[in-house]
Amino acid sequence: MPELPEVETVVRIIRPKLEGRTVTAARVRWRRTVGARNFEAKVVGARVVRVWRRAKFIVAGLLQILRATRVEGFRVELSEHRK
């Protein structure tokens, strides 16, 4: 488990790279984490509106979905264009 300052550093690095972009693909690596297939289907096409930290979790606010995830076990691909 990363320490709190490490999580804050990651958020500060990824925030400008994620906010305003659209998710083009998603993969949950640890299938028991969430309803993996359902989550992957719902998150594709969503726009990232906000990225922040809540304790040791990185939270991504998506236009229609809100999900929290630990730093590990989560991968999202984003479009190159911001909206």
Image (spheres, grey):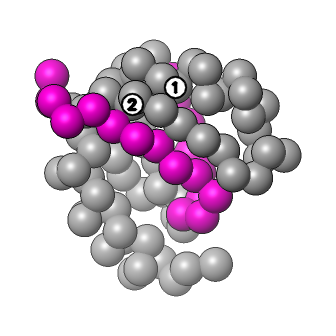
Measured as percent of width and height from the top left, residue 41 is found at 61, 20
Q: Secondary structure at mark 1?
A: helix
Query: Does the CB distance between marks 1 and 2 fall below 8 Å?
Result: yes
Quadrant of the rendering where the N terminus is positioned = bottom right
Please name the amino acid that badge 2 sits on: Val
Q: Is residue 81 left or right of residue 74?
A: left
For residue 52, above or below residue 37: below
Of the numbered discs 1 and 2, the one sitting upstream in the chain is 2
Mark linked to residue 43: 1
The residue depicted at 41 percent of the width and 80 percent of the height is: 6
Image quarter of residue 78: top left
For residue 20, above or below residue 74: above
Task: Please name the predominant secondary structure of the magenta segment in the image.
Answer: strand
Please name the amino acid that badge 1 sits on: Val
Q: CA distance from mark 1 to mark 2?
A: 7 Å
Question: Which residue is denoted by mark 2 in the rendering?
Answer: 23
Quadrant of the rendering where the C terminus is positioned = top left
* Label 1, residues with CA under 10 Å away: few <14, some 14-19, many ≥20: many
Magenta residues, as a range?
A: 65-83
Measured as percent of width and height from the top left, residue 54 is found at 49, 56
